């Protein structure tokens, strides 16, 4: 029986990196946590149940509006965090239609499901927006980093779909007086990141090289720079956005930028290798049709109004990820 004092939350994208971190955070804050999961045969179902036994899973899909209505009726949430997305930028070029349906239209489906079922207009909604909406082009790149007032120029189907999600969230906030906000998060990584993402691909490969299980790693461009933080810090910012008296959008970032080369260098140093170049091969297959050169965020508004600030610095993030992958790969021997 759920305590009447417990807040209830519905998280879409519960099996992803942020979903896991957020579920853990909210469970610790005495929330009753519900997670939307796609299909009985989802390969991540058992792992999610094992790692987060306190999460009640509800079958549903953000592309299926009727399933979201049902999820709302079952969860009866006070807060909804929409983290579901086709979230790999490179992959979005290969499946642009699916990316549009899930990452873009899926936001509309979730907002409409809330509007129809939340007759008292009490549900607070968080939309996971992204720095990829800015595009990183020189003409719209502020000196001190992108902030909440910066102009957008997305450079991938993923970024375009996320921009639709951002604007439809703002539209529902203004049209229906919903407490609906977007968190414009810059790159946030960690031990729960999927192996298809470059940071985790690097740290996993470094661990395997250290253990003699792999000889080299294949990557695309090494020069792009990103504002990289730790995902565990960023979900705290998400939660803080929904605790405000009024709905506002916020940028979450570290305020500093580092290249993929820098990430490589720190990762290899963690295993005692100073010269990483003999272990890295560039593969054109991993290069994108349109690359974002540099993304740097200005988190000053979030720091000032939310009291949020990242705790894990860049070297600490790399160290944490390499250590985790060494532990994971060591157990596979």
Image (cartoon, rainbow, N blue to C red):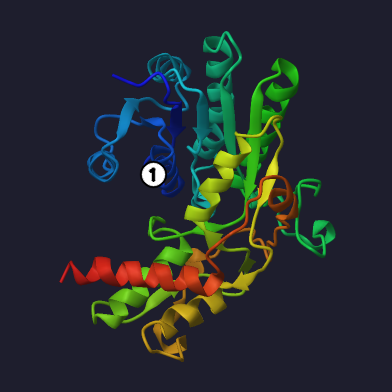
Residue 244, placed above or below residue 226: above
Residue 199, placed above or below residue 160: below
Tell whether 28 sits left or right of 123. left
Disc 1 on helix, strand or loop? helix
Query: Image quadrant of residue 225?
Result: bottom right
The number of numbered badges drawn on the structure is 1
Residue 236 percent coordinates (x, y): 53, 47
Residue 216, placed above or below residue 238: below
- Dividing the image into 4 quarters, which one contains the C terminus? bottom left
Residue 260 visible at all: yes
| Residue receiving disc 1 | 24
Tell whether 23 sits left or right of 254. left
Residue 40 percent coordinates (x, y): 25, 30
Residue that appears at 40% across and 40% down: 23
Tell whether 307 sits left or right of 102. right
Residue 216 percent coordinates (x, y): 36, 80
Residue that appears at 32% across and 75% down: 207
Q: Nearer the viewer, residue 309 or 226?
A: 309
Residue that appears at 69% across and 31% down: 247
Q: Counting other residues with Cα less than 10 Å from the Cα at mark 1, is it few (<14), some (14-19), or many (20 or more)?
A: some
The extreme left residue here reads: 333
Residue that appears at 42% across and 25% down: 6
């Amino acid at each position: 029986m759920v305590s009447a004092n417990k807040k209830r939350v519905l998280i879409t994208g519960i099996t992803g990196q942020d979903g896991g971190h957020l579920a853990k955070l909210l469970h610790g804050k005495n929330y009753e946590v519900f997670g939307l999961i796609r299909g009985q045969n989802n390969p991540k179902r058992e792992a999610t149940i094992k790692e987060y036994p306190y999460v009640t899973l509800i079958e549903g899909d953000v592309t299926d509006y009727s399933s979201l209505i049902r999820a709302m009726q079952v969860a009866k949430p006070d807060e909804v965090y929409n983290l579901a997305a086709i979230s790999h930028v490179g992959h979005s070029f290969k499946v642009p239609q699916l990316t549009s349906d899930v990452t873009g239209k899926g936001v509309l489906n979730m907002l409409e499901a809330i509007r129809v079922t939340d007759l008292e207009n009490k549900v607070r909604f968080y939309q996971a927006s992204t720095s990829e909406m800015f595009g990183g082009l020189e003409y719209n790149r502020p000196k001190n980093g992108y902030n909440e007032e910066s102009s957008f120029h997305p450079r991938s189907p993923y970024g375009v779909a996320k921009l639709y999600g951002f604007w439809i969230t703002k539209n529902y906030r203004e049209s229906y007086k919903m407490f609906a906000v977007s968190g414009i998060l810059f790159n946030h990584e960690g031990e729960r990141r999927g192996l298809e993402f470059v940071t985790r691909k690097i740290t996993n490969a470094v661990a395997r090289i250290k253990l003699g299980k792999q000889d080299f790693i294949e990557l695309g461009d090494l020069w792009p720079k990103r504002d990289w933080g730790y995902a565990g810090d960023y979900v705290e910012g998400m939660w803080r956005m929904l605790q405000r008296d009024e709905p506002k959008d916020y940028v979450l970032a570290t305020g500093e930028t580092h290249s993929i080369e820098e990430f490589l260098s720190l990762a290899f140093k963690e295993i005692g290798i100073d010269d990483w170049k003999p272990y890295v091969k560039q593969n054109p297959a991993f290069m994108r049709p349109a690359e974002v050169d540099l993304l740097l965020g200005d988190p000053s508004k979030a720091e000032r109004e939310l009291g949020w600030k990242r705790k894990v610095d860049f070297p600490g993030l790399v160290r944490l990820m390499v250590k985790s992958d060494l532990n994971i790969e060591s157990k596979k021997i």
